[in-house]
Image (cartoon, rainbow, N blue to C red):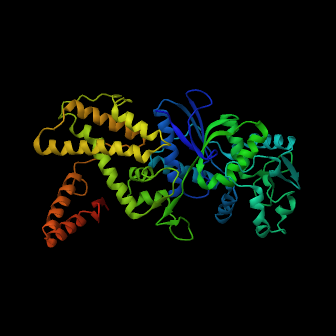
Amino acid sequence: MTLTLYNTLTRRQEPFETVEPGKVKMYYCGVTVYDYCHLGHARACIVWDVIRRYLQFIGYEVRYIQNFTDIDDKILNRARVENSSMEAVADRFIKAYFEDMARLGIKEADEYPRATHTMNGIQRLIHELENKGFAYPSDGDVYYAVRQFAEYGKLSGRRLEDMQAGKSERVNVEDPEYQKKKDPFDFALWKAAKPGEPAWESPWGAGRPGWHIECSAMVRDRLGDTIDIHAGGADLIFPHHENEIAQSEAVTGKPLAHYWLHNGMVKVDGEKMSKSLGNFTTIRDLLDRGVDPMAVRLFVLTAQYRTPIDFTDEAIAAATNGWHTIKEGLLFGYQYGKKLGWELEEGENSPIENSDVERFQEIVNNDFNFPGGLTVLFELAKELRREGHILVHEGKTETSPDKLKHQWQTLVTLAGVLGLEAEIEAEPDKINGLSDAEIEAKIQQRQEARQGKNFAESDRIRDELQAEGITLIDSRDGTRWHRN
């Protein structure tokens, strides 16, 4: 069962081979800390969190680095509006980031470098680029000479000749920055200080680094010249990741990363998420509305990580319903273990091997196919839920206690790989007056009433459930429900 990944750089799926056997060096381009994290950040962070967990699950030692961009025009603009400082704004939203990610069950990275803490590495890299003829100073700025790097465009597939065709229509020749450049495609490595902005001393004068050089320096300082996986959103392929490659590889002569992985974007009701459209949702707003963090994780994992995903009320309701199913399975051992004669000991749910685990791994090894892997979890959870209902109503199960224990331990193990965890103490026998089993029973009664054309009874049951905070969603595939 060989793990294969789709590599943006080569545009094909390839077997995964690490620079150092058994070890993975992984870098994720993190957030620019000027505001609260939104659904797009949630998707990216969940995806890379689960990929890291899965690599560890199949035996790799993973060193995972995620940066914070804490120098940026957006941060400076927010600081001006709030009559604050760039550092204060960045610190506030870094703190908020950790709060949001903790609620989503995101494991912390091994290290979180910040651009402001990597100034020596940034300046050293710019100096090396200058010495090698890939960078030039211009009136306090320093620019990267794009045409000097023959492989520019290899990640995005863009060619300078094609981009040149429409460039003249978009360039403002009166722009002072444009006038400093030798070529319109060149980009800033260092920006001269402007009045009222924070600045650092450098061989080129006081100023601050450009965005692209920050990540090149942080990767090199924390992980070395070549890493295994460089991850980020698809919107970063060009120009950010393209420029990272040009900067780093021009100096080292080595590949910056062997595998470039990119997650798809999040849409809201089919439209791009943006503040101007009024469909911009932060993580904390969503969770504060009562959406279960595990339902958010499940929503993200039901789509292939490279494809766009559409956030709708119906989608999150379906994910919530799915999470209730898996949650019931995860709680099975704690609810019925003693009754079945199990003896649960600390550490007993360590990685196990069986046909379900092998099937899960075989599915997921195909470019991190987590939606396919989830089918294994749902099969186990539904079987455990069914056996739980039989145990409640008949006092015994159809499957042997030992087999049920093994199925439950398998579910707990695989759910842990995906970061899906149920809190035991937070699961009372009844929520909002009705247990999941009672809700399912009432839905069945309603279905029977509808089949008998007793629509008054059907409506009565719907209204009764609605009064208990349960919303039903009828579709061709049956009836789904979620708690309000």
Q: Is residue 246 positioned above or below 308 on the image?
A: above
From the viewer's perspective, tell me whether residue 133 is left or right of residue 116: right
Q: Position of residue 132 (x, y in %)?
A: 85, 41
Q: Nearer the viewer, residue 354 or 314?
A: 354
Q: Position of residue 303 (x, y in %)?
A: 45, 52
From the viewer's perspective, tell me whether residue 214 is left or right of residue 179: left
From the viewer's perspective, tell me whether residue 480 is left or right of residue 251: left
Q: Position of residue 127 (x, y in %)?
A: 83, 42
Q: Single out the residue that lies furthest toward the bottom.
A: 456
Q: Which residue is drawn at the image coordinates 42% and 48% (left, top)?
A: 371
From the viewer's perspective, tell me whether residue 54 is left or right of residue 350: right
Tell me if residue 108 can be seen: yes
Q: Single out the residue that lies furthest toward the left.
A: 394
Tell me if residue 426 can be seen: no
- Quadrant holding the C terminus: bottom left
Q: Is residue 22 positioned above or below 456 on the image?
A: above
**Labels in figure, total:** 0
Q: Position of residue 251 (x, y in %)?
A: 78, 39
Q: Which residue is drawn at the image coordinates 76% and 58% (left, top)?
A: 197
Picture quadrant of residue 458: bottom left
Q: Which residue is drawn at the image coordinates 74% and 55% (left, top)?
A: 159
Q: Nearer the viewer, residue 397 or 157?
A: 157
